[in-house]
Image (cartoon, rainbow, N blue to C red):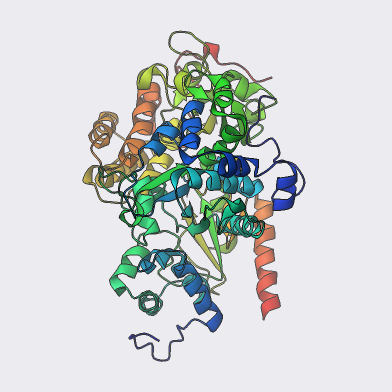
Amino acid sequence: MNKNNLGSYMVTFSEQELAKVKEIIAHYPEGKQKSALLPVLHLAQDTFGGWLSTETMDYVAGLLSIEPIEVYEVATFYSMYNLRPMGKYVFEVCQTGPCMLRGCDDIIAYITSKLGIRAGETTSDGMFSLKTVECLGACGYAPMMQLGKYYREHLTPEKVDAIIAECRNAAASQN
Amino acid sequence: MGVQLLLEKVNVEGIRHYDVYRREGGYRSVEKALKQMSPEAIVEEVKKSGLRGRGGAGFPAGMKWSFIAKPEGVPRHLVCNADESEPGTFKDRYLMEFIPHLLIEGLIVSSFALGSHDTYIYIRGEYAWIADILETAIAEAKANGMLGKNILQSGFDCEIYVHRGAGAYICGEETALIESLEGKRGNPRIKPPFPAVQGVWMRPTVVNNVETLAAVVPIINNGGEEYAKIGVGKSTGTKLISACGNINKPGVYEIDMTISVEEFIYSDEYCGGIANGKRLKACIPGGSSVPILPANLLLKTAKGETRLMNYESLSDGGFVSGSMMGSGGFIVLDEDQCIVKNTYTLTRFYRHESCGQCSPCREGTGWMEKILWRLENGEGKESDIDLLWDIQRRIEGNTICPLGDAAAWPVAAAIRHFRDEFEWHVRSPQEARKRNYGLAHYADPIHVPVAG
């Protein structure tokens, strides 16, 4: 454990996750462990509720022996790091030119009407967030969204319905 | 079907895995390079091939390699740029997802040529599942003695690591990528020093695009001269084109650079024509940064020659009447598309992705986005068009990295070729809100081919 007093907030990697951190650090030269920051932040976000709290960032700073500010400046730069809690399922819909040409505006409007949330908002039950994003490199398969690790492509209103149902079912089966 | 050097085997069942890839002739270039060739000889073959960087700038790859500094006792690194983020571009993703060992093979040979024992693949963070595919391919290659210590008893050691970014277009710029690999914000560095002298961890570094490194495989297998025979002029070899927008068959195509733009768009072998029986209005042929061209200037140069899908022909006429090959992100717009709206979404993209270091880019992209938004939404003024032109001129060439130029060019080209459409938005705000300008009056639509 590092110098940060984490109190009752359980921001602590498991043995397995710590081994993963060690493995990532080993990819870089001796003394250049800061290079592991981006991958370790991904791991931290996945582990600690899908976003990076100040506690989480401070914890990562301790793990890599760097100053907390070095983590904050990185976490605020890259769009994949969430700096506030997000819904359990985050629909990240691309809105850049090539997706616009294939009707992403209609898909975003459809999601808004189905879930009652606009871009940047989360449903009151904490289930879904809608985020508009810039080009994800799926231009030939537009319109599209990222959902967790994977892309959902060639979106239609029917596909969006199916994805929403799939998420609800997955959440229900976890309870 | 033309010559296929990269994607020929992409549809072979199981090609994603080592055994099948090897059975299909994979990793021959590693054997040849490590057993029969010196690093210098490999660099020489790549020079002979005429291979140009496939990320967008088109700089000769062999020449870039020859710049790497070799100070005594300082490790050198090869970094693969898999940050593919230019709107319209999804070719590297396709290659890595479906034939990952081709990249790994190219990386091993290139690492040997450059003396890189620790090589990195910097992949955009959103391609998370592709990072897994690459990790698997690396593990398979290592299990079969193609990576690790003393590869094929040659005495050469090499490891490849996958490093995921976290969502930042700017990290495709090589010095920003290096900063990001060091665990920092992706702020481009001032050059010189160039990465070849002081790159990652201040060590000599070469950064190459995925497709460039994959192309090293056929160059070593067949020889640089054979590679240079394909294509035309300084556009040697094959190029991956990712085609998208309003076409019947969006996707990734490997072309030899002798076919015409018209054939690429209308042939069933490639894009299969414009979707829904519409007419071609315009195209951004090389990723969102390059100038948009109206249909007539896309299909024929200003001199009236057939425009071909290669570096020279696409840039014929400069920015006045030509465009660029860029990254090969080929974005097609049909007659229903609004140029102002398209330009607005691209400018929003660049405003979002500007790292904020240089004022002209940070402030300029924001102002351009706001002005384009009001034009698109019927709140623009006649003077806004000249103001936009003025702002983009003040960004171009005045920033540390090329993102400023990349943000300026689409706006400049849209105004240059479609000024009447901008003016229509100002004069007919109610109309502009309801419908699109279509093909009306723009650049001689008589010559725009009709689908079918």
Write the residue at 36% across / 85% down. A2
Q: Is residue B434 visible?
A: no
Question: In front here: A28 or A9?
Answer: A28
The location of residue B174, given as percent across then percent down, is: 38, 46
Q: In this view, does B139 lie to the left or right of B399?
A: right
- Above or below, A21 against A115 in this view is below
Quadrant position of the C terminus of chain A in the picture: bottom right
Question: In front here: A113 or B108?
Answer: B108
Q: Is residue B89 left or right of residue A81?
A: right
The location of residue B141, given as percent across then percent down, is: 63, 55
Q: Is residue B199 left or right of residue B47?
A: left
The location of residue B412, given as percent across then percent down, is: 34, 29
Q: Is residue B53 visible?
A: yes
Write the residue at 57% across / 63% down. A148
- Of all residues, the one furthest to the right in this rendering is B13
Q: In which quarter of the image is residue B200?
A: bottom left
Quadrant position of the N terminus of chain A in the picture: bottom left
- Above or below, B173 against A59 in this view is above
- Above or below, A16 against A169 in this view is below
- Of all residues, the one furthest to the bottom in this rendering is A8
The location of residue B443, given as percent across then percent down, is: 44, 16
